[in-house]
Amino acid sequence: IALNGTSSFYLKHTSSDSIGLVDGGGSAVDTIAWSATVEGESLVAPNSTHAGVGPNATNASGNWILSAWATPGEVNPVWAAYNGSTQLAITEVLPYCNDDSIEPTEDWVEVHNTGSSPLNISRWSVMNAEGERRFIRLDSLWTEGNQTPKVLLNPDERAVFTMDEYILSGLGDAFDLLHPDGEAIDSAAWTVITDCQTLMADEDDSNDWMHTLWPTPGEAEPIPSDFATKDDLRFTRFMPSASTSISSDMEFIEISNQGDDLAVLNGWTLRTTTGAENSYNATITSLMVQPGASIILANDADAVRVYEDGNVVDLDGVLDRNFYIPNSGAALQLLDGSGAQADTLVYGNGPVSVSGWSGIALAEPLSNLDNLIYLRGNGCGDTPDTDTVLDWHEQWSRLGGSTFCFDTSLTTSGVITPLLAPEHGLADLLAWIESATTSLHVHMYLLHEANLVHALIDAQNRGVDVNVVLDYGDSWWKQYDLDTQRGMATELLAAGVDVKWFGDTGENPYAYIHSKVAVKDEQSVWIGSGNWRSSSHPAPGEPGNRDWGVLVDDAGLATMVLNHLAFDENEAKGHVTPVLAGDAPAGWVMPTPESIVGTTAPGIDGDFEAQLLVCPDNCIDELVNMLDGAEEEILLSLQYLDMDWSWGWGENPILEALEEAAQRGVRLRLILNGAFLDEDIQSAVDRFNEEWNFTMGYDASSIVMSSDDQVTKLHNKGVIVDGEHVLVSSINWGDSALVRNREMGLLLSSEAVASVYVDSWYEDWNRLDNSTDTDQDRLMDKWEEEHGFNRTQRSVAGDALLDESLLDADQDGLTNFAEQLHGGDPNNADTDGDCITDDLEVAWALATALNASADDVEPFDALTQWDADGDGQNDSAVLGCDLAGVDIQPVDNNNGNVQTSTDDDEDGVLNEADDCPETPAGVATDAQGCSSQQRAELVEDSTENTSGDSAQSFFLILMISALILSAGAYVVLRGMRSEAEDVKDAISEAAFADVVTTPVATEGWQQPVLNATGSGVTPAMLAQVPGWTAEMVEEYLKQGWTFDQLVAYYQEQVAQHGQ
């Protein structure tokens, strides 16, 4: 044997080589050569049928090639032309796996006998694109478990052929399946990059091979069309950054399968992109999502499971590498096995230029809330797919909060009992609780009414299963309210009631449980706007808040409500904790129950529709739907309506829906509570009255509710739409209630039921007292209604600087405010008909206080009595109609010929009677032809000369000074009406209940008589401001002035006007 250029004897298998056989004389007998081959494989001549070249290649020459199998010491087999079955197909291939995670661990090809007869796969082979060939042999076949491999495949049987590595590439490759004579029968080609993922043919033969859903060596491959595709998968919830006491790595992404088939995401890719070319990919190795289901992928799945329900899995367990969600922002993408985009989300400072996204990135809705969860659509399967941020701008949640997806509407029939407090409520609830036989569930913000607590204890004692959830309270609560809440809770606990706190943690997803809801025996529901305390549920006949409640007897509704209540009764939730005996306040004593005797409200039996509203889950959407559905009228009865809050990514949606309703011609009427009047409430009133009605011309109007000896405050949160749909709820119309609190409401559709609430609503609209000023024009609503003015609107057309209080309707020189202040008739220049105009009567009365020799005359007496000074004679007979002792008689300078005087400034006052003959056109004037500005200028001019010939001058100056002072105090009043936003936003009903509103009897009310009788102002104080009455001083003090400031201001005014 002669070696080819070698100094020692060995045969190469890593590069070309050759060997020769020579005889003893050194002559070559035979020579062979081969190119690089594989260790452990035998070679035969290139024309050997045992090399799989077929009988047609008997004259082939060149390098030796692999044999079908080694035959040392035997004659190489010679095979006739192959005439067996060719129904053998490549069905699956593993070209590369770097970590041996796929069994078998070698690279392998699966073949399938697709024919109807047995097929021997001996001498079949595969050849790659470089011409490298491997034969299928018995010892290269893999079987699972203890099964025996075989080369004879029966019809529909499969075989897995393993090979040495690097025959096939995971970076894209191709190969052929050759029958024993070397003819290609099938082929496979792919361009996708693959690692530890098997490939299969696409259903479209013209496409490259694709990833299988999962490896199935020796078994049929799952058919992709039987499974969910990229169009079925969505990102549906996303929390990019979160930290709690148990973990600082709480971020997660939820993927939902919205198709009808199982989603197998093996081989799919999660990608984050934080810059133009800075992408990070992780391949999903094992993940399935059932149809209609979702899966949460989290870095700390155990921590997330503490707060979130559902299927939570660790990212590390389903991906081939670590994967993190950048806090600051990124483009997050899900790609299917072929690399096609399934979904894209760009948030924070992520690049919006990535494929699959358009427009701005998703940003946090509110900066003062942590652990925010972004929801796609409504979070309940409604997942818009516009590839824009709008897909994520409908709703958001917080870690540990609910995402209710229960059905919340029903059509049924039953008995509905409207409860209108203060007339009805307490007696009805006591009777309802006493009728419970199996269970009671009560969720309440404040539970302070002792009779109701005793009724719950009695129910527990007779075997009813009572469950109560109460708000834990907050630092701003008054100590009395905290003690009462804890005292009632621990009394219930001691009686065996299952009592829980809502919010006794630092990681509460809600601000408060503000619901007022109860369910009895799984058959009947109570829901209302009023807490279970005496202000909202007073004893029969006692005054209290205007609140709406309702009892509905319907098992379907009861089940619906209980499904939602269960979430807040689950102590596994971080915001729910058990009440403990140690929560009892020191020294607190349970009040003794009273004997409550009263009639219960009548029920209404009939068909109805019901829609349950639960905040923060669906209440904004449902409130907007309710308002959008209005066709004729919306009647609102609200504790307050916040105007300046944003729900997250846009303007106030409730306000927007109201304005859209007004724009389409719906009549809007709003009643707001006045006991908590601040600038927010006033701005809501002004939006309806001044902007929408006065400026825009919409049919919109709002009032501040007046009180009486029964209805003290408006604590309601109710709406009536088109006289058919009525909302009874705990939902205040502000951002805290709608986006932070647990709230509940019920929208009932029944004309019979709605009519009860409509009647009560109009009672509140028409009620008038002596202290309510809706439009803040200093004219009380009752006074304006009595005299034909507009109680809801202060603006005056044509003059932006005026309001109704500054007008002089009867042109008597007294503004409407002065008429109200002194008891005059604003529509009659001479209220008492004694020929002395009202302005002179008031000026004379005020002047008497400065004249030691004259008896004091009250302005009210001067305006309403002919003999105001009580001297037994008509004032006009003694003083004259002009208070100068001379009657004003027409002057005839034309010997009986009437000549019309001129009115140069066309203000309606003839020149000879016009104190201001150059008034600009269109400006409102008083009886003397002067505008408010001109009258002020005249007052200023009078400081230089107070000795005019007219006896009216000083009196008028004094009167105007007093009115100017009252106007100044009015400005101070308007400036001081500002409540602390944090308290109001916190829904401070405890503080609200402490606002004392003294019932004001309206029967027999008369214009105020301004004297010091019963006043808190002392005679010594009045002596320092002669001419002012006790009521005037008291009013100024209420408006924010100190008495020292009033005295100083009074003295300045007197000095300024020459006294």
Image: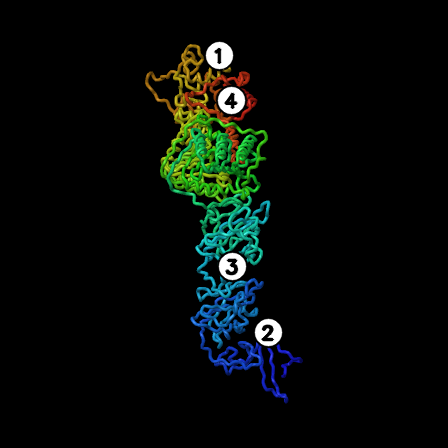
Q: How far apart are labels 1 and 4 at the CA level?
A: 25 Å
The local secondary structure at tag 3 comes to loop
Q: Reply above or below: 675 against 661.
A: above
Rate crowding at label 3 as few (under 14), some (14 to 19) or many (20 or more) other CA atoms within 10 Å: many
Q: Residue at x 52, y 67 (%)?
A: 147
Q: Are marks 3 and 2 in contact (CB under 8 Å)?
A: no
1 or 4: mark nearer the eye: 4
Q: Reply above or below: 908 against 466.
A: above
Q: How far apart are labels 3 and 4 at the CA level?
A: 80 Å
Q: Is residue 152 visible?
A: yes
Checking the image for residue 266, the label placed there is 3
Q: Position of residue 713 (x, y in %)?
A: 46, 29
The answer to which quarter of the image holds residue 559 is top left
Q: How far apart are labels 2 and 1 at the CA level?
A: 135 Å
The answer to which quarter of the image holds residue 104 is bottom right
Residue hosting label 1: 854
- Answer with left or right where residue 890 lies relative to residue 182: left
4 or 2: mark nearer the eye: 2
Disc on the earlier residue, 3 or 4: 3
Q: Residue at the far bottom: name it.
A: 25
Q: Amino acid at mark 2?
A: Glu
Residue hosting label 2: 39
Disc on the earlier residue, 4 or 2: 2
Rate crowding at label 2 as few (under 14), some (14 to 19) or many (20 or more) other CA atoms within 10 Å: few
Q: Amino acid at mark 1?
A: Ala
Q: How far apart are labels 3 and 2 at the CA level?
A: 35 Å
Q: Are marks 1 and 3 in contact (CB under 8 Å)?
A: no
Q: Residue at the far left: name it.
A: 897
Q: How many numbered marks, from 0 up?
A: 4
2 or 1: mark nearer the eye: 2
Q: Nearer the viewer, residue 485 or 898?
A: 485
Checking the image for residue 1034, the label placed there is 4
